[in-house]
Image (cartoon, rainbow, N blue to C red):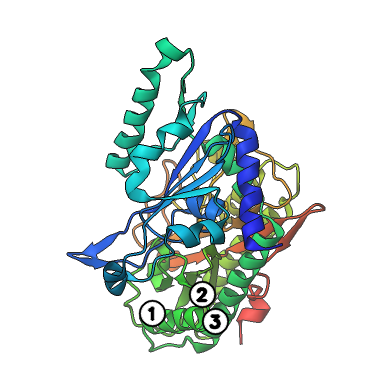
Amino acid sequence: MTQVTEYAQRREQVMAKIGKGTAIFRSAPTAVMHNDVEYNFRQDSDFFYLTGFNEAEAVAVLAPHHEEHRFILFVQPKDLERETWSGYRVGVEAAKSQYGADEVYPIAELDEKLPQYLEKADRIYYRLGRDTAFNNKVLRHWQKQMATYAKTGYAPMALADPAPVLYPLRQIKSAAELALMRQAVKIAVDAHNHAREYARPGLYEYQVQAEIEHIFRQRGALGPAYPSIVASGANACVLHYTENTRQMQDGDLLLIDAGCAYEYYNSDITRSFPISGHFTPEQKAIYEIVLEAQLQSIAQVQPGNPYKQTHDTAVRVIVEGLMDLGLLQGDIEEIIKEEKYKPFYMHRTGHWLGLDVHDVGVYQHGETPHNLEPGQVLTIEPGIYISPYIKPAEGQPEVDPKWHGIGIRIEDDVLVTASGCEVLSAGVPKSIAELEN
């Protein structure tokens, strides 16, 4: 299947669901880092999912009810002077042939051409975003259409967010998407394995980060999927630590949370290991709890199982383990219900993964749990963090300083299959026997 066919199939699925509606999708803006220096452009994920078009200042319209044009693109025209400064553009003519649009217009003609694709729609699907000017533009067009209702008897009577239509489709990964995700994971697996061999006392965290991200780019990834976390010692107790400036010491645990983006699809892997080759007794005890929590949580990744079962399983294992060590005390059900474990484990056990690192899709439908389906990809990432500044929950014991500074997280990328699950990132070792020299 060609990429053009893949995108066309996605659009057809969306159009089948919106019926007589018209959907409008806006490209990502060009983001400014500071003054007039721009970030590397990263397309909006919804826009890219439906079009494959990777330029700013573009709009995609899906109008299944239109007699001639069902997929319409508005793009920047060719402009040699501008392209000399900011890169080549596909242009209007090439966009039509390369991206399968029924019609393509210059973006400057949006206000003129858009009304014909709205006038017979029963609703407009558009997600109000951060671009206030474009939000207002869509709202003005909607108001103009509504003003014709008394004369014509029809108009788009509602403005609806396309998320409930689009996001369930994005959650189930196609074979083509899984191929890209497997490559993103494979690159990250190699980077993690190299980092574990490279890390040693005396190096700085940023040196390990550089080795990881060198492999990302060398192997064809766009770069890190998110700011790489290379956290030694007590830094591992900071969930989103990204300074990566500390010099690593003998006896440290090193937590590395790093993944890459490959053709916009992401990996997300975390490992914690002793850089000197051996766990201390306290480090080993905490690591064993986290590993068991992760293994049992992964075992719950089965089609039909509630998503929240992965988290509930991890929490129970962690609470039981901490109680065995005397770090928590009391009735286990009360500890879980009142979340008295949260000073040690304060985040959820995972998230959806795909075009976005924290990919789209619901985790709960009100009081009804969301059940796992084949083709979904999620992370499983329990952890225990014993900050030197930890404050136990009310009624819980003070933490012996021998535990201070231990932060451990283990994260894998897991595909839901028809019969169970596949750990895509299994190539990074995590057993104690494999991590100790």
The answer to the question of whether label 1 and label 3 lie on touching residues, with beta carbons closer than 8 A, is no
Residues at marks 3 and 2, CA–CA distance in whole angstroms:
6 Å
How far from the left and from the top, in percent, is residue 366? 57, 28
Question: Which residue bears the numbered disc 1?
Answer: 205
Quadrant placement of the N terminus? bottom right
Left or right, residue 234 beside residue 45: left
Task: Using the image, determine if residue 36 lies above or below residue 343.
Answer: below
Given residues 428 and 130, the one toward you in this image is 130
Residues at marks 2 and 1, CA–CA distance in whole angstroms:
22 Å
Mark 1 nearby-residue class (10 Å; few <14, some 14–19, many ≥20): many
Is residue 34 in view? yes
- Name the amino acid, label 3: Arg
Q: Earlier in the sequence, mark 2 or mark 1?
A: 1
On the image, which quarter does residue 326 sit in? bottom right
The answer to the question of whether label 3 and label 2 lie on touching residues, with beta carbons closer than 8 A, is yes
Mark 2 nearby-residue class (10 Å; few <14, some 14–19, many ≥20): many
Tell me the mark number nearer the camera, choosing from 1 and 3: 3
How far from the left and from the top, in percent, is residue 368? 63, 30
Q: Earlier in the sequence, mark 1 or mark 3?
A: 1
Question: Which residue bears the numbered disc 3?
Answer: 219
Tag 2 secondary structure? loop
Is residue 382 in view? no
Question: Which residue bears the numbered disc 2?
Answer: 221
